[in-house]
Amino acid sequence: MPRSSPGPRALLDAVASPLHPQAAATLAAALDAGWAEPTRLYAEARRAAALLERARESIAADLGVRPPELSFHLGAGPAALTAALDGAAWPRRRAGATMVASAVEHSAILIAGRYAAAQAQDARLFLEVPVDASARVSLTAWGHAVATPGCAVAALQHANGEVGTRQPVTAAHEQCAAAGVPLVVDAQASLGRWGVPPAYDVLVGDASSVAGPPLGLLVVPERTAFRRSGPPREAEFGRADARVWVPLALAAAEAWQQCAAVRAADNAAAHELIGRVRAAVAAIPDVEVVGDPDDRLPHIVTFSALYADGESLVRELDRRGLALASGSACTSSTLEPSHVLAAMGALTHGNVRLTLPWEAAVPERQAGIERLIAHLPEVVAGVRAQLGAQGL
Amino acid sequence: MSAEPGVVEVDARGTRCPMPVILAAHAARELPPGTHLLVLATDPAAAADLPAWCRIRGHQVQALTTDPDGAIQAHLILGP
């Protein structure tokens, strides 16, 4: 494996980014101030409990909900998502056990849904709703699926974390409401960065989206019927499997607050930088930008290069100081390509995914984008040459 | 498996993405429009990538099947 260059690095895969510097400082301080178990009765514990509730209040305020409606989940977004689906479906168990999800939902949903249907040998227990070439869910098919007798719960992303396309959440929620089906909106890619989804019954996010530590967020408004299956839980209003570690919540709240303060300006700058990448990529022969060109998150872009393999592209970019992800099969452990790209009918090979970090977390991000634009044509051509794919 | 008359077979079995598409493209370069190309592959990504390549290059997918053992057969008609 080639060694990475010693020159400047550009981290352009903010699914996990360096912590916001103030979140990192808060985390360090919280190791002293917030280490105690907040349910104990001694002074250190009471202080930790008070800090935890302040963190909860500050994030809840930005989300426009009451603090008890927000719970924190260790295990990050996927743990909050699992809790969301379980807790929204259980009160509906007399109606049925069918789950509806778009074909581009988080793999945690798709794997669980397919597993449940396979275990019960009943394909009707999990309905996957197709998407169009831009990853947007078909509302006609969505409406049919949620109106199916036995439907307990539905899950739809606010926006897709791989390609950035936003979903018609308002219309999908109306269809769910008409059928009496609660809608879990998975906003792991957008919450904190792109505001609150316009409609939801249960909402899921992750503090990673604001350059915070991985910490799952679950919003259950008072109006939503919600109860986890199985024995009662104690943590986080009965919603979480484990108590939150207070320093994580404090760092998450600090990152949240810092990013909320610069959200509009950072999004505008991100939109412009991503727009430059999209234009540069489109000028390379046989490279397709994937996802909706306009109705998308401002900080994500994904493209696929025909006749190239994702692993070689990502390794060569890394050698040139550029850290990016890929949805191609050869870069994952499963040998299966990204289910999102496959569901869209996009090329799954030669895929490169850029998730722009917040400028505060990665101040050199603009220089990184400029380097990416400068290097990419050569990188793509080089990988194609290695594969004997010139002139096709 | 031998190809039927008039069908050009590309055997990409055992190769990983993006080789099935590259092998199909090499074959297509030498063939006239309307040729029936049968691509055999075993890489799961080929089931998504051969149709995507056809969309980009203006070829048509006549049929694409995946056997339970993962063997993919893509019947393609080359475009102009």
Image (spheres, coloured by chain):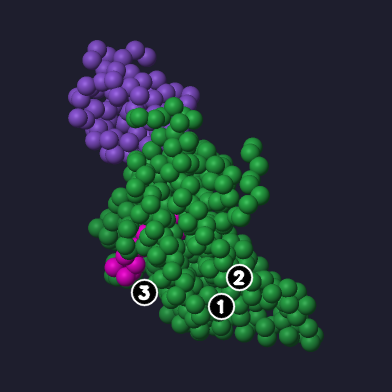
Chain colours: A green, B purple
Q: Main secondary structure of the magenta part?
A: loop
Please provide percent x and percent y for residue A120.
46, 47
Mark 2 burial class by Cα count in 10 Å: few <14, some 14-19, many 20+? many
Whichever of callouts 3 and 2 sits on the residue coming sooner in the sequence is: 2
Which residue occupies the foreground of this view, A289 or A217? A289
Q: Residue flagged by tag 3: what amino acid is it?
A: Pro
Please provide percent x and percent y for residue A321.
58, 50
* Element class at badge 2: loop
In contact (CB < 8 Å): disc 1 and disc 2: yes
The structure residue drawn at horizontal position 27% and vertical position 14%, both measured from the top left corner, is B4
Can residue A307 be seen by looking at this rendering? yes
| Span shown in magenta | A158-173
Please provide percent x and percent y for residue B22.
39, 29
Dot 2 corresponds to which residue?
A: A20
Dot 3 corresponds to which residue?
A: A198
The structure residue drawn at horizontal position 61% and vertical position 70%, both measured from the top left corner, is A20
Please provide percent x and percent y for residue B48.
37, 38
